[in-house]
Image (tube, helix red, strand yellow):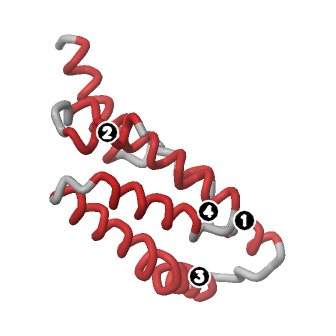
Amino acid sequence: MNINEIDEELAMMQLSDSFFPTGLFATSNGLEFLFSKNQIKGVDDLRNMIKTSIIQQIGPSDCVALVNALKNANNKDFEKIIQIDEISFSMKSIKEMRNASVNSGTQLIKCVSVFVKEDDILIKYQKA
C-alpha cells in the first residue's frame, strides 16, 4: 500500500467512523448544560431535545442549505455556494455552534479532497 492509498483510506475512515471526529464533537447543542441544570431528566427529555433540533434547525436550515449548495455545485455556480455558506454561518447565533460548523466543514473538505481530486468547485471552495 502506497502513501496515497493510505491517505485515501484514512480520509474514508474519517468520514464514516465516529471514532475519527470531523469537528462536530466540539458541540452538543447544549446537552451538557441542560443536563447539569437538571433540564434533561430522562429519555423523553432527550428525545424532545433531538426532535426540537431537527424541527427548528436541521430541517429548515441545514438541510435547505445542503440541498441548495448541491444544486448550485451541479450548476457550477460558485458564487451562490459562497452566498449559501455565508447565510448558513450567519444563522448560527451561538459562537461555539458557528465555530463547530466551520471546523467540521473544514475537516470534511480535507477528507473529501483526498479522494476527489479533480472537482473544480471543491478545489475553489477549499481555497476560499
| Image marks 1 and 2: residues in contact by CB distance under 8 Å | no
Viewer-nearest residue: 81 or 11: 81
Q: Are marks 2 and 3 in contact (CB under 8 Å)?
A: no
Residue 35, horizontal then vertical, whole percent: 75, 72
Sequence-wise, the earlier of marks 2 and 3 is 3
Q: Which of the two discs, 1 and 2, labels the residue nearer the N terminus?
A: 1
State the SS at label 2.
helix
SS at badge 3: helix
115 to 48, vertically: above or below: above
Q: Check the image and report above or below for 62 versus 46.
A: above
Quadrant assignment for the N terminus: top left
Q: Residue at x 37, y 38 (%)?
A: 126
Q: Quadrant of residue 66?
A: bottom left
Front position among marks 2 and 3: 2
Instruction: Say whether disc 3 or disc 1 marks the residue closer to the N-terminus.
Output: 1
Q: Report, in whole angstroms, how far the alpha carbon at label 1 lies from the one at label 2.
A: 37 Å
Q: Mark 3 highlights which residue?
A: 49
Q: Residue at x 26, y 20 (%)?
A: 6
Q: Which residue is mark 4?
A: 28
Q: Left or right of 41: which side holds 82? A: left
Disc 4 to disc 2, C-alpha distance: 30 Å
According to the picture, the residue beneath numbered tag 2 turns out to be 124
**Front: mark 4 or 2:** 2
Contact between marks 4 and 1 (CB within 8 A): the answer is yes
Mark 4 vs mark 1, CA separation in Å: 7 Å
Q: Is residue 63 above or below residue 96?
A: below
Residue lying at 62% horizontally and 57% vertically, measured from the top left? 27
**Amino acid type indicated by mark 1:** Glu
Q: Amino acid at mark 3?
A: Met
Q: Which residue is mark 1?
A: 32
CB contact under 8 Å: marks 3 and 1:
no
